[in-house]
Image (spheres, rainbow, N blue to C red):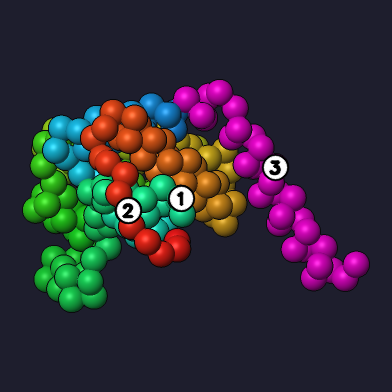
Amino acid sequence: MSDEKKSIEKHFLQSAKLLNSIATDKYVSIIYSMGQLIANSIEDGGKLMLCGNGGSAADAQHLAAELLVRLRPKVNRQGIPAIALAMDSSTMTACGNDFGFEMLYERMVDTLGQKNDVLLVITTSGRSSNVIGALKKAQSKGILTLGFLGAGGGPAMAFCDFSFVAPSDDTALVQESHIAAGHALMITVEDLLLAKDIIKEGSLSGEH
């Protein structure tokens, strides 16, 4: 096997090892508790807000879409209110130009956030200043704060009511565990809302 192929194999094995390490009651219970909190928020008329930077911003958008549109091909149901705070380029560049990029998510939470909402931040380092600003603003507004973190949690952990901290400081591996945990979380939210008849299954067509 070439060195390049060995590198690919090594990455797969490391990712699988990390995913296996979070398949324990400790991490499963954290995800389930987060799912209950989000489902309760939706039941009370709230929404889920998500944010992150770089790949984590893409993950935030990905997970918001799973709730807004559809998560599982055979589960056709009403949309679930969620919004990724990395919005259009005009909003992001205006905020970056006028107030500074570090203010972006704080501004969005302050403007769009309501008391019954939940904020889920995704940061592999736990050190992103704009994410920490969003967490602080959310707490000041009485909004529940959840974190998908890595590298021990970083400073962001202090501002999260509940945290899923991937046990790694490798950015790529943390991101891979975050999207796996994110899918598990969205499935939990969907199942809880369907079980409580908060959202109803419909007759949508098409494939995921």
Q: Residue 17 carries which label?
A: 3
Contact, mark 1 vs mark 2 (Cβ under 8 Å): no
Q: Which amino acid does label 1 sit on?
A: Lys
Q: What residue type is labelled 2?
A: Ser
Q: Does the magenta stretch include residue 70?
A: no
Name of the residue lying farthest toward the right: 1
In three-dimensional space, the C-alpha distance between marks 2 and 3, rounded to whole angstroms, equals 39 Å
Q: Read off the residue under disc 1.
A: 74
Q: In which quarter of the image is residue 185?
A: top left
Q: Residue 148 carries which label?
A: none
Mark 1 or mark 2: which is in front? 2
Q: Residue 203 carries which label?
A: 2
Residue 129 x, y percent position in the rendering: 30, 52
Q: Which of 80 and 92 is in front in this view?
A: 80
Q: What residue type is labelled 3?
A: Lys
SS for dot 3: helix
Boundaries of the magenta span? 1-29
- On screen, residue 126 versus residue 202, left or right, reads right
Q: Is residue 23 magenta?
A: yes
Mark 1 or mark 3: which is in front? 1
